[in-house]
Image: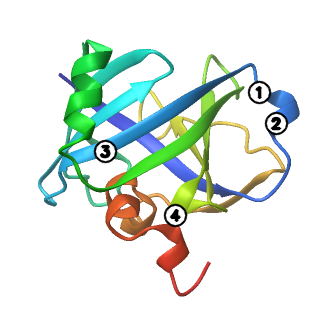
Amino acid sequence: MSKEIERKFLVTGDFKKYAIKSHKIAQGFLSTVPERTVRVRIQDHQGFITVKGIGNATGTTRFEWEKEIPVNEAENLLLICEPTIIEKIRHIVPANDNLYFEIDVFFGENNGLIIAEIELPNENTEFIKPSWLGEEVTGQLKYYNACLAKKPFSHHSEK
């Protein structure tokens, strides 16, 4: 069990030339109640189940528990998830001081959305903001994957 401390940003420029790895991800949610989300994910050829708690007042910190599971079990769990399964490519881009941006390029009903997240050791950790990083959306629930599964980006009135 641990705390996840992260900040989220929209991406407005070209980041791909800085990416050092990329992963194909499919994920769904078994539970999206506000107090906890239960996520099933297949990343490349690995399966995971993750439980996340509600965020703090700033939206940067929340409880997170994750366990690797056999990929065939993850595939079966995806079949019983709430609509919609999220599909994305995650690009890993180095930041500074052993920090990395995880940039998700969404497909399907979330096509057109690109979000960068950076996990931090504490809420006050400084990091360099590259020119391709746009508006900060930390704490804006509509950009959380659990919300994007329920109300995809294509259904947002403002983009």
User: Which label's residue is closer to the chain start, 4 or 1?
Assistant: 1
Residue 6 in the image: above or below residue 142 = above
Which type of secondary structure does the marked residue at label 2 adopt?
helix
Q: Mark on residue 19?
A: 1
Q: Which residue is mark 3?
A: 28
Q: Mark on residue 16?
A: 2
Location of residue 129 in the rendering, given as x and y in whole percent from the top left corner: 73, 45
Q: Mark on residue 109?
A: 4
Q: Please give the name of the residue rendered at 44% of the width and 37% of the height, measured from the top-left corner.
A: 26
Location of residue 141 in the rendering, given as x and y in whole percent from the top left corner: 36, 65
Q: Please give the name of the residue rendered at 43% of the width and 49% of the height, measured from the top-left corner.
A: 86
Marks 1/2: CA distance?
Answer: 5 Å
- Report the side of 68 relative to 154 (left or right): left
Q: Is residue 97 visible?
A: yes
Marks 3/2: CA distance?
Answer: 26 Å
Circle nearer the viewer, 3 or 2: 3
- Report the side of 94 relative to 2 (left or right): right
Give the camera-side residue of 149 and 96: 149
User: Which label's residue is closer to the chain start, 3 or 2?
Assistant: 2
Marks 2/4: CA distance?
Answer: 22 Å
Give the camera-side residue of 141 and 57: 141
Which type of secondary structure does the marked residue at label 1 adopt?
loop
Q: Tell me the crowding category of disc 3: few under 14, some 14 to 19, or many 20 or more residues within 10 angstroms, Cα based.
A: many
Give the camera-side residue of 132 and 114: 114
Given contact means CB atoms under 8 Å apart, are the residues at marks 3 and 2 in contact? no
Given contact means CB atoms under 8 Å apart, are the residues at marks 1 and 2 in contact? yes
Q: Please give the name of the residue rendered at 71% of the width and 28% of the height, measured from the top-left corner.
A: 93
Amino acid under disc 3: Gly
Quadrant holding the N terminus:
top left
